[in-house]
Image: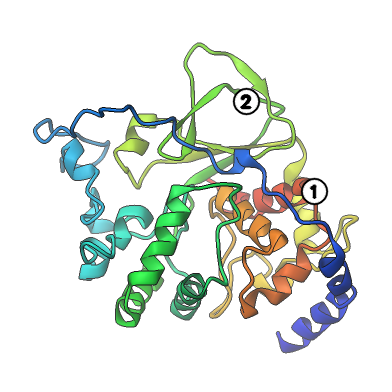
């Protein structure tokens, strides 16, 4: 591994000047779907009606599902017992980690899947968020990322270490299907992801990667068994495979050098296989734009120096497809 990293660094050295001289990279707005404006006088959350998701005998009310200091746990048998910081957080400063990242750590397209990541890696990323070295690349306010930045500022070292240890021990499973299409359903935004508008027809995908919740209600209910669908341009997977394995025309170092032959990650490097392609693409964009500027990300910033948005879509699509059902 050490020898491979030396080779990659040598290949990347020529990119340093290009990174310094390149024009600022603007993150595309479609990568950060925003909720429509809230009504001036929103109705209070329902506290009585029990809500359900498939394959779970439990029920929650709308009010319970909106409480960020209590992680909805539809499938308690799918994970180890949660520590307090994951299940409840610490009001008013620290939300329950499991509310956004789900109790089993699988996450959703608007945030990170943490299950099975190295604990030291998780701790390092939170530290970078706290210091400002890791920021969102969104062109404006993006609440999922902004909330995480605030979480990092207020969580204690002990809370971060406890959550990292817990999530690192959970089993990861892919929750996305990657489909190549030239046209996609017309959509609306629910819970920071796209959802098809019934009867509205379709539209050109173009040079985009869009991840859909096929069941908007289950997504809103925070069903961590929900399978998402990511649409990518035709031939993205073949082009992404070339990039990942050292081909293509960008001269970018191959992903497999550090992340492993099947992009499964290592004891210190995160897995890419099967993760949300939306999330992966946001991270590539963040490295490209300079929003992820931590010392441990120096190699990745050189890797993406010569990549365009289409190349990054291809790489994210291929990585996500490796464990798609």
Q: Which residue is mark 1?
A: 239
Place of residue 185 in the rendered image (x, y in percent of width and height, measured from the top left): 58, 22
Q: Residue at x 77, y 39 (%)?
A: 235
> Is 155 or 57 nearer to us in this picture?
155
Place of residue 205 in the rendered image (x, y in percent of width and height, measured from the top left): 69, 29
Q: Residue at x 58, y 67 (%)?
A: 264
Q: Residue at x 77, y 67 (%)?
A: 303
Whether residue 199 is situated above or below residue 16 in the rendered picture = above
SS assignment at label 1? helix
Labelled pair 1, 2 in contact (Cβ < 8 Å): no
> Is 133 or 310 nearer to us in this picture?
133
Place of residue 135 in the rendered image (x, y in percent of width and height, measured from the top left): 55, 63
Place of residue 13 in the rendered image (x, y in percent of width and height, measured from the top left): 86, 78
SS assignment at label 2? strand
What is the number of callouts on the image? Answer: 2
Q: CA distance from mark 1 to mark 2?
A: 20 Å
Callout 2 crowding tier (Cα within 10 Å): few <14, some 14–19, many ≥20: some
Q: Along the horizontal axis of the image, is 235 left or right of 51? A: right
Q: Along the horizontal axis of the image, is 90 left or right of 189? A: left
Q: Which residue is mark 2?
A: 184
> Looking at the image, which residue sits at the far top?
199
Front of the two marks 1 and 2: 2
Callout 1 crowding tier (Cα within 10 Å): few <14, some 14–19, many ≥20: many
Visible residue check, residue 303: yes
State which quarter of the image contains the N terminus.
bottom right
Pointer 1 or 2: first along the chain: 2
Visible residue check, residue 80: no
Quadrant in which residue 92 is drawn: bottom left
């Amino acid at each position: 591994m050490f020898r491979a990293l030396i080779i990659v660094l040598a290949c990347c050295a020529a990119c340093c000047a290009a990174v310094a001289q390149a024009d600022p990279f603007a993150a595309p707005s479609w990568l950060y779907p925003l909720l429509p404006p809230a009504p001036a006088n929103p109705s209070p959350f329902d506290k009585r009606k029990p809500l359900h998701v498939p394959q779970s005998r439990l029920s929650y009310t709308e009010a319970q599902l909106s409480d960020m200091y209590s992680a909805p746990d539809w499938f308690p048998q799918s994970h180890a017992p949660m520590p307090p910081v994951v299940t409840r957080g610490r009001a008013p400063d620290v939300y329950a980690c499991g509310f956004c990242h789900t109790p089993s750590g699988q996450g959703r397209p608007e945030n990170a899947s943490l299950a099975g990541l190295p604990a030291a890696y998780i701790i390092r990323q939170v530290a970078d968020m706290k210091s400002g070295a890791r920021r969102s690349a969104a062109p404006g306010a993006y609440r999922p990322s902004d909330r995480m930045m605030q979480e990092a500022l207020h969580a204690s070292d002990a809370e971060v270490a406890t959550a990292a240890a817990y999530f690192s021990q959970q089993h990861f499973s892919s929750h996305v299907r990657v489909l190549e299409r030239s046209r996609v359903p017309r959509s609306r935004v629910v819970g920071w992801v796209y959802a098809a508008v019934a009867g509205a027809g379709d539209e050109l995908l173009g040079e985009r990667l869009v991840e859909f919740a096929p069941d908007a209600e289950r997504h809103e209910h925070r069903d961590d068994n929900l399978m998402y669908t990511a649409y990518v341009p035709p031939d993205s997977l073949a082009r992404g495979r070339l990039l990942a394995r050292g081909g293509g025309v960008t001269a970018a170092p191959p992903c497999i050098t550090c992340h492993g032959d099947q992009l499964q990650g290592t004891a210190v490097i995160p897995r890419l296989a099967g993760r949300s392609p939306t999330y992966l693409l946001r991270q590539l964009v963040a490295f490209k734009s300079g929003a992820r500027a931590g010392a441990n990300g120096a190699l990745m910033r050189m890797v993406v120096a010569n990549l365009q948005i289409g190349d990054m879509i291809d790489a994210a699509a291929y990585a996500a497809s490796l464990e798609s059902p």
